[in-house]
Image (spheres, helix red, strand yellow):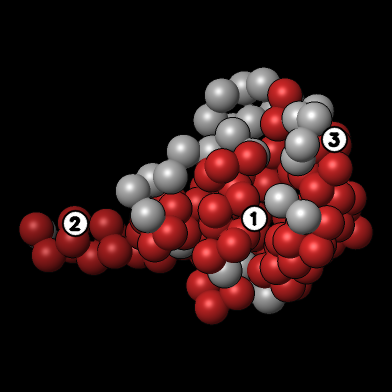
Amino acid sequence: MSADEKEKVRQDWQRFVESGFSKVKFTKSLYNHLIQHCSFIAHYNQGGFYDTYFEDPEHTLRFLKQFDKDFGCKSVEYGMDYWLSSEDYGDVNTAMVEAFEPYKVDIYPWLRQKAKEKKLAQIQTLMKEVEELE
């Protein structure tokens, strides 16, 4: 990748994070970089990848640990951090980690709240189903 292509990926990443992981902001270039240079598998295609990591807030929390220094930046799929020290892509991957750093203080509580709300909605649905059985 050229320096300009790497910068575009970093900018796409930052916009995606800033958007609260909007599907519209999950660009093809960001997806391709994640699967080719950040130790993620493709999950069939861009839509499958998005669904795997960004439809459920608990999965998003897990995904983000890879880009968080506090969690050691270990690949969520392979458990290694070699994606950060790649000779050709370590610079852009490190830039993505750095770009995420200022957002995590707000993103983690927001995602935990969304996960809690999702669990509560599931409980309410189950309770209604139980009531219908009575």
**Residue drawn at the location 57% of the way across and 69% of the way down:** 27
**Cβ atoms at labels 2 and 1 below 8 Å apart:** no
The numbered disc on residue 112 is 1
Outermost residue toward the left in this view: 133
Q: Is residue 76 above or below residue 104?
A: above
What residue is shown with label 3?
Answer: 70
Secondary structure beneath label 3: helix
> Where, by quadrant of the figure, is residue 26 drawn?
bottom right
**Residue drawn at the location 54% of the way across and 78% of the way down:** 24
Give amino acid for label 3.
Answer: Asp
**Residue drawn at the location 80% of the way across and 48% of the way down:** 92
Q: Which of the marked residues, 2 or 3, is nearer the chain's N terminus?
A: 3
The numbered disc on residue 42 is none
Marker count (numbered)? 3
Give amino acid for label 1.
Answer: Arg
**Residue drawn at the location 70% of the way across and 31% of the way down:** 83
In this view, the residue in front, 67 or 111, is: 67
Task: Give left or right: position of 56 versus 10.
Answer: left
> Where, by quadrant of the figure, is residue 21 drawn?
bottom right
What residue is shown with label 2?
Answer: 130
Give amino acid for label 2.
Answer: Val
Q: Position of residue 47 (x, y in %)?
A: 39, 62
